[in-house]
Amino acid sequence: MKPPYKYALVTGLTIGIFTVSFFSVVNWFNTTYNWGIQPANIRGISGLLTILIQAIGIYFSMTTVKINQNGLLSYIQAAKAGLTVAIITALITATFGFIYCEFINPGYAKYMVHEAAKTMAANGESQQQIADHLVSIRKEFSTSAQVMMALIGQSVIGTVLSLIMAPFIKNKNNKA
């Protein structure tokens, strides 16, 4: 298997397992020990950490391609290796999101909406304001939105990471 595909599978599976586990475990600790962290913030932290995981996968994909080509790697080749990781990671992550929302935790969207409503009430929002906001929050945490956010988010972040990292990984003498 070509290195970009291997690292894409490893990165995608790692991110998928990480996001499901991280949210579930940290949210359990949060509710059990009353840490007071909003579940949406836990989800956000998880998302930020996946950027690091994806960057590591892209880096190893690019450097392995370079090693396999006897140290010769152009910007385009490096970017292509990174984009392969980004796209496959996005597909795997979206699949994990679907499985999580539909089968592992089918009450996820309802839970997130309920938590958002509690936060808005605690912040002094009126019932009408809460009702208005909950319409968009229900959409945001629906399974289809979670899948699309994973597809778009992982693809865009991975593409940006690839384009930024490629000049640093490619040959410095520009012969490749």
Image (cartoon, rainbow, N blue to C red):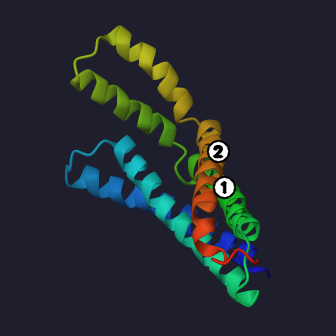
Query: In the image, 96: left or right of 68?
Result: left
Q: Where in the figure is residue 5, as x and y percent of width and height?
A: 74, 73
Q: Where in the figure is residue 23, as x and y percent of width and height?
A: 42, 55
Residues at marks 2 and 1, CA–CA distance in whole angstroms = 7 Å
Question: 141 or 101: which is nearer to us?
Answer: 141
Q: Relative to 169, say whether 16 is above or below.
A: above
Question: 38 or 63: which is nearer to us?
Answer: 63
* Structural crowding at the residue carrying mark 1, measured as other residues with C-alpha within 10 Å and reported as few (<14), some (14–19) or many (≥20): many
Q: Where in the figure is residue 41, as x and y percent of width and height?
A: 35, 44
Q: Amino acid at mark 2?
A: Ile
Residue appearing at x 30%, y 28% in the figure: 118
Q: Classify mark 1: helix, strand or loop.
A: helix
Q: Relative to 43, say whether 78 is above or below.
A: below
Numbered label attached to residue 90 = 1
Q: Relative to 67, say whether 75 is above or below.
A: above
Q: Classify mark 2: helix, strand or loop.
A: helix
Q: Check contact, mark 2 vs mark 1: CB within 8 A.
A: yes
Question: 77 or 159: which is nearer to us?
Answer: 77
Residue appearing at x 43%, y 31% in the figure: 113
The numbered mark, 2 or 1, whose residue comes first in the sequence reads: 1
Q: Amino acid at mark 1?
A: Ala
Residue linked to disc 2 = 152
Q: Where in the figure is residue 133, as x and y percent of width and height?
A: 43, 19
**In the rendered image, which quarter contains the N terminus?**
bottom right
Numbered label attached to residue 55 = none
Q: Residue furthest top?
A: 128
